């Protein structure tokens, strides 16, 4: 299930795939052993293999972001209601989007999602673009 894989760069997906392959073979190694092995193998892979894992990584990120967005849409609780979003954008006189992004990050973390800043900013921008004008104007 791609959506449950570690999202990251192509190498991280390659390393995770290598670890799963070794587990299937009955070989269990620590991350300290796996990382140098994966690094060495990654370095010897031809560009088409690396490109495959980079593309797979991007697909995983899209699946993950879609799952987060769908979760928020389908499980919108009082913390993320339109009224709360509207209220949070007026706190401290800050930039409405910055406050929105910060509150969204807090909500996602409370749900167990830990996006890096680049992913979070893209995701927040996407959700922000879908907010009604009354939220954006505050």
Image (spheres, grey):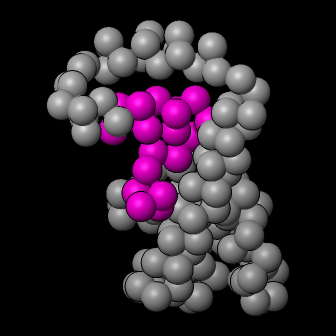
Q: Is residue 9 magenta?
A: yes
Q: Residue at x 69, y 74 (%)?
A: 127
Q: Left or right of 33: which side holds 28?
A: left
Magenta stretch?
A: 1-20
Rendering coords of residue 4 (x, y %): 40, 57
Q: Which SS type dominates the magenta stretch?
A: helix
Res 9 visible? yes
Q: Residue at x 75, y 65 (%)?
A: 125
Above or below, comparing residue 19 to residue 126 in the picture: above
Res 91 visible? no
Q: Left or right of 65: which side holds 138?
A: right
Q: Residue at x 47, y 61 (%)?
A: 3
Rendering coords of residue 37 (x, y %): 43, 13
Rendering coords of residue 16 (x, y %): 42, 36
As rendered, which of 111 and 33 lies closer to the eye?
Answer: 33
As rendered, which of 118 and 23 lies closer to the eye?
Answer: 23
Q: Image quarter for residue 6?
A: top left
Quarter holding the N terminus?
A: bottom left
Q: Left or right of 132: which side holds 76?
A: left
| Numbered-mark total | 0
Above or below, comparing residue 49 to residue 126 in the picture: above
Quarter holding the C terminus?
A: bottom right
Q: Is residue 96 magenta?
A: no
Q: Residue at x 70, y 47 (%)?
A: 55
Q: Image quarter for residue 102?
A: bottom right
Above or below, comparing residue 69 to residue 22 in the picture: below
Rendering coords of residue 9 (x, y %): 62, 36
Above or below, comparing residue 50 to residue 52 in the picture: above
């Amino acid at each position: 299930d791609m959506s449950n894989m570690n999202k990251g760069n192509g190498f991280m997906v390659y390393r995770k795939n290598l670890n799963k392959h070794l587990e299937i073979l009955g070989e269990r190694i620590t991350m300290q052993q796996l990382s140098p092995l994966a690094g060495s193998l990654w370095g010897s892979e031809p560009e088409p293999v690396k490109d495959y894992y980079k593309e797979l990584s991007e697909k995983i990120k899209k699946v993950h972001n879609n799952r987060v967005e769908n979760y928020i849409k389908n499980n919108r609780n009082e913390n993320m209601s339109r009224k709360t979003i509207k209220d949070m954008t007026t706190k401290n006189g800050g930039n409405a989007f910055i406050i929105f992004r910060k509150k969204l990050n807090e909500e996602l973390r409370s749900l167990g999602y830990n996006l890096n800043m680049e992913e979070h900013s893209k995701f927040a921008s996407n959700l922000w673009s879908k907010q009604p004008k009354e939220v954006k104007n505050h």
